[in-house]
Image (spheres, rainbow, N blue to C red):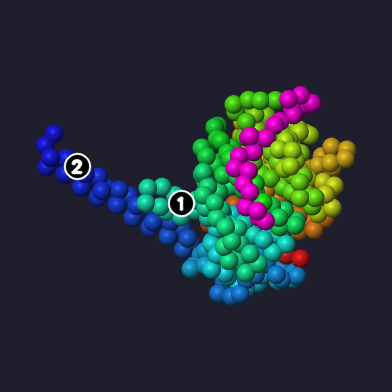
Amino acid sequence: MTRNRRLLILALAVLLLGSLGTVMVLRAAARAGQTREGDPTVAQGQVTLDHKDGLLFLNGAPGPHRGALVSVPDRTPQGERAASELTCRRFHASAGTGVCLDSRPGALAQDNQARIVDSGLRTLHSFPLAGTPSRARVSPSGHFAAWTVFVNGESYGAAFFSTRTSIVDTRTWTLEPDLEKFSIELDGRPYTSGDVNFWGVTFSRDDDTFYATLGTAGQTYLVKGSIARRSVTTLARNVECPSLSPDETRVAYKKRVARGASLWREHVLDLRTLREQPLAEKRSVDDQALWLDDRTLAYALPADGAPDTSDLWTVPADGSGEARLLTPAASSPTRLG
C-alpha cells in the first residue's frame, strides 16, 4: 500500500469518527431537550451538605442543569430546584461527605472518576474508575465511601456482566480497590471462584460493618462484611442492591422474580429473623433504594415518555399502602438531616 493511500484511508477514518461523534452528541442533545408536562423549574442556587433537612438528587429535567446535583425542601419535593455546579452520574452523601461518580467523554474513551466532596461540594480527592458508574454510598459517619462500576456490560439484567466495587477511607484515603480480594464464607464454608462479583454496598454506623451483593455461579447473595477483617459472609439468597435501614434492623433490596429476565420486586428483609416482606411497588425496580426514614423508601423508575430519564418514587417499608411519585426527572436521592 502506498504512502498516499494510507494517508487517504487515515483521513477518511478520522472524518467517519468525527461524523459518528457529531451524530451521538446531537442525539443526546435531542433526548436531553425532551420536556414533559409538569417538569420542575431548575435555577442556579447554593447547594451544600450542611442543611439539617432537605432532599438532594441528580436533576434529570431538560436544560442546562441536567445531571446537576440539586436540592429541594423536604416539604416541597416537587417544587423549584436549586442547582449546584456539580454534575454526576451517581451521587450519595452523609455527615457532610459526598461521593460523585462522574463520566465524561475522553480522547479515546469515557473518563470515569469517583470524586469525594466536602460539605461545600469541593473535591477533596478523586479516583479513576475502571468502568461505567453504577452504585454509590457513603457511610453514616462520612468516614467511608463505596462505589460499583460495570467493567463489562451495562445492566444487571444482561446475560453477562462484571463489576468492580471499591471502598475508600475518607480520612486516610486508603483504598480497597476491589472487594473480590476479600475472603468469602458462603453457606458456612470458605469459598473461591473466578466468577465472583460484588455490587451495591451499604454501611453500618460502626465504621466497619457493611452489606453488599455477592454474585457467583448464577446466584446472588446478601453478604455481611468487615472492612477491618477484609471478609464477607453470606446471609441470604436472591438479594441485590441492599440498603440498610436507619435503625439497622432491616435491609431493603431488589429480588429477582423471573429467572433469566430483568424483573425485580422491591422487598425488605428482617436481619434478625431473615423474614422477607414484599412491598406494594409492583413495577420492576432496578435501583439501590434509599431509606427516607425508618418507614419509607425512595427509588428511581424509568420515566414515561422521556428516554434516559427517571422519576423518584416512594413506598412504605412494611408492605402496606401504595407507591407514590416523590419527584419527577430525578435520580440518586440523598436525604439530609
Nearer to us in this view, 293 or 34? 293
Counting labels gives 2
Q: Give the secondary structure at mark 2.
A: helix
Q: Determine the residue positioned at 62% across, 31% down.
A: 196
Q: Is residue 16 visible?
A: yes
Q: Would residue 74 be found to the left or right of residue 329 on screen?
A: right
Query: Does the magenta run of residues contain 171?
Result: yes
Q: Determine the residue positioned at 70% across, 70% down.
A: 50
Q: Which residue is mark 2?
A: 9
Q: Where 105 sits versus 157, above or below?
A: below
- What distance separates the C-alpha of mark 1 from that of mark 2? 28 Å
**Quarter placement of the C terminus:** bottom right
Q: Determine the residue positioned at 54% across, 62% down.
A: 87
Nearer to us in this view, 175 or 324? 175
Q: Amino acid at mark 1?
A: Asp
Magenta span of residues: 170-190
Q: Which residue is mark 1?
A: 111
Residue 335 location, quadrant: bottom right
Q: Amino acid at mark 2?
A: Ile
Q: Determine the residue positioned at 54% across, 32% down.
A: 160
Quick one: label 1, few (<14), some, or many (20+) residues within 10 Å?
Answer: some
Q: Would residue 207 be found to the left or right of residue 134 on screen?
A: right
Circle 1/circle 2 CB separation < 8 Å: no
In this view, the mark in front (1 or 2):
1
